[in-house]
Amino acid sequence: MKNKIILFIVIFLAIMPANIFAQHGGGSTVLGLPYEEIHAKHDVAMPYQYVREADVMWSKIIWRRIELKEKRNHILYEPIQPIGAKKSLIDVVLDGIETKGLTAYKARSSDAGSEFDVIMKEDELQQQMGASQEKLLIEVLEGFDTVVVNQPYNSADVTSYLVKELWFFDKQRSVLDVRIIGFCPIREYFRKSDPDRLDPQYKKVFWLYYPEARPLLANSAVFNPNSDVTSLTYDDIFQKRYFSSYIFMESSPYNRVISEYEAGLDALLEGEKIKNEIFNLEQDLWEY
């Protein structure tokens, strides 16, 4: 009888899942779940459908702006400080540029058609993000001396993004489709002459080519506010259009920003007009 009990214990220990020991301190890894999260760690960007040039009946380039202060876009802004493997979008791409070879391109005042032609250097990126050097006078035995102090940038200063995308109608699949071409972080800052921070200024930091960034974004988990089980990635956010934005420019002979000829509410309505024109085009094509 004693031998049977010992045999039963040996068999039970052999078939018991290893993660049970991990949860109770019996292993080197402590898990807070009854399972190991492996899906997001090995996620890959879903390949695009192949499109032939001959099948594209219509196309138009659109530029959008995503404001991170909008409630729906908080998912791109938070967490402000990394929590475990979860980082904000800007922290993910900055880490990708620094450690994974992701290419940052210079952002110019007029970017239409020239967003990805000049690669940005590391010191230029630091400066665009707001890093600076300040000279301070300190008192020493012989009088005063000048000390240079490096002020690091704050990634939380990025409060919006520009997105460049191509809309097109593929007659082979009979669908109106979209491809994101790239996106650009926008840094918000205040001049020294504005100590009350009443007049925010905005600066384009750099452009990222989206197809190059997709593998990194597809492996960057995002907190899903609706479910802890269903994981999301930043690639999911962009591909499934889980963000709020407004159109500020469309491709045209002059590539004019809407704010150059409309202001305030009229500018927003002009963006909505462009969006409705694209929607109506799809409906018109289905009539034939």
Image: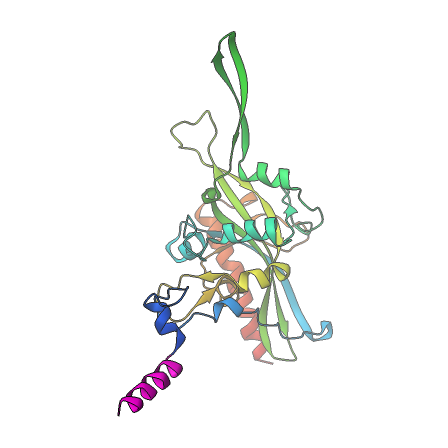
Count of numbered badges drawn on the protein = 0
Q: Is residue 128 left or right of residue 188?
A: right
Whether residue 228 is visible to the viewer of this picture, yes or no, is no
Give the residue displayed 31% in from the left and 89% down from the top: 3
Quadrant of the rendered image containing residue 216: bottom right
Q: Residue at x 52, y 7 (%)?
A: 142
Give the dominant element type of the magenta stretch: helix, strand or loop. helix
Toward the left, the furthest residue is 1
Above or below, 110 against 251 in this view is: above
Quick check: 170 above or below 160?
A: below
Q: Residue furthest top?
A: 142
Residue appearing at x 54%, y 48% in the figure: 185
The verdict on residue 13 being magenta is: yes
Q: Residue 238's spot in the image, x, y percent?
A: 51, 63
Q: Quadrant of the C terminus?
A: bottom right
Q: Position of residue 236 (x, y in %)?
A: 50, 66
Q: Could you tell me residue 257's position as x and y percent?
A: 58, 47
The location of residue 10, given as percent across then percent down, is: 36, 83
Region rendered in magenta: 1-16
Colour pattern of the rendering: rainbow
**Would you say residue 76 sits in the magenta stretch?**
no
Front-most of residues 271 and 8 = 8
Residue 59 sits in quarter: bottom right
Q: Nearer the viewer, residue 251 or 48?
A: 48
Which quadrant is home to the N terminus? bottom left
Answer yes or no: is residue 259 visible. yes
Query: Which residue of the protein is positioned furthest toward the right in this rendering?
Result: 54
